[in-house]
Image (tube, rainbow, N blue to C red):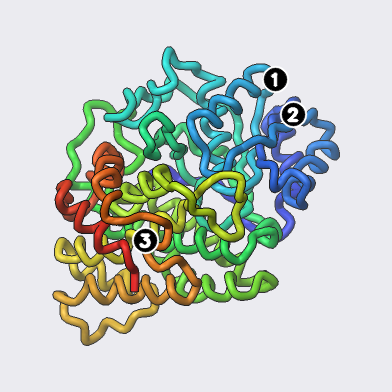
Amino acid sequence: MAASSVRFGAGVTREVGMDLVDLGARRVLVVTDPNLVSRAPAQTVLQALRDARLEAVLFDRVRVEPTDVSFKDAIAFANAHPTDAIVAVGGGSVLDTAKAVNLYTTYPPADFIDYVNAPIGKALPVPGPLKPLIAIPTTAGTGSETTGVSIFDLTGMKAKTGIASRRLKPTLGLLDPENTRTMPPQVAASTGLDILSHAIESFTAIPYSSRPRPDRPTLRPAYQGSNPISDIWSLEALRIVNRFLVRAVEDPGDDDARGQMILAASYAGVGFGNAGVHLPHGMSYPVSSRVKAYRAPGYPDDHAMVPHGMSVILNAPAVFRFTATSNPARHLEAAEALGARVSRVKESDAGRVLADRITWFMERLHVPNGLKALGYGQEDIAGLVEGTLPQHRVTKLSPRPASADDLAALFEHAMVAW
């Protein structure tokens, strides 16, 4: 179990300069995106660095839903402007980009693909410690401030993949509810539904004890399967989502709800950061990467994009109907944490009950009604399956193995949600 260091509270962003001084930093790379650079969260960070008499180097070109191309752009900038610490302020795209920058500038590989998860890349272990990285999320969803995972779109493959190592974990996550005020309601919905799926997937993943023991402790994967500690974090994240997600989306001024959701993101991050996610995430990667023209409200419209949380949740009801037979009790426990009444439900109905509860949230939060609403059709299923099959890092954690034919059926069922 790898613990995560976080600090929660309104206004903690203003402490980042003092934290960096205590870490011995003098010159700091600030990583953010073009939409945030002039807004309060990023400006608060820059002011905190000035107050602490630290030199700030600003990189504000992070791409929302990053690619290997955008990662390389950030890495090249960081190599040209050496620093001794990094601050990432933004959503999951910013935090994941900063993790990649930290790794590739500290231990440059022979080939970019060397650190990427197998079988797409070589999955080489991170050789040693990285520079201090402070992560300051402005969305409540990815939980990237607590995980050792960095996700991106490998453009040549038209599928998302990632890099995973405990050494990628940020040194500290600053969870400041004030920073989520900049989230449009549509972003709050997508990221909140990402939390929901993170928590269910990690809770229903194969047990850690069913995986083979690695030859050395350093080779133990970051995603180990469900375990007694991750279960606690995942279930509590679901309870918070049930109480506060709709409030946080429907009333952006509800600071209590938004504060609770940024906590839920980290809770789920601790859960899935150690247990892992499975089919909804594995299937989401080609959904995001193969999008043709869809542009999500509330997000940058400079390129076609399916937000990550949306691409995950659209697959989730079909998946959990499929996986419930592996452990009906776990699926019912997840449904109960999400607010479903399960006391008289038969185990044979566990998948339906959990799927129905997820779909209730999707409808209430005005998520597109299935993959068809994003422009996908029957003719795209073969490509979506092709993009899912190599995602072994997550798909092999499914409590019920899914063949290519199974995946095709799941994508077909996800075409229309209700």
| Residue underneath mark 1 | 81
Distance from Cα at disc 1 to Cα at disc 2: 7 Å
| Residue underneath mark 2 | 57
What is the residue that sits farthest to the bottom in this orientation? 344
Q: Are marks 1 and 2 in contact (CB under 8 Å)?
A: yes
Residue toward you, 79 or 375: 375
Q: Would you say residue 7 is visible in this rendering?
A: no
Horizontal and vertical percent for residue 209?
20, 47
Which is more N-terminal, label 2 or label 1? 2
Residue type at numbered disc 1: His
| Residue underneath mark 3 | 372
Horizontal and vertical percent for residue 293?
48, 50
Distance from Cα at disc 1 to Cα at disc 3: 44 Å
Which is more N-terminal, label 3 or label 1? 1
Q: Secondary structure at mark 3?
A: helix
Residue toward you, 384 or 89: 384
Q: Is residue 230 above or below residue 418?
A: above
Q: Secondary structure at mark 1?
A: loop
What is the residue that sits farthest to the top in this orientation? 110
Quadrant where the C terminus lies?
bottom left
Residue toward you, 8 or 300: 300
Question: What residue is at 49 percent from the left and 35 percent from the top?
Answer: 67
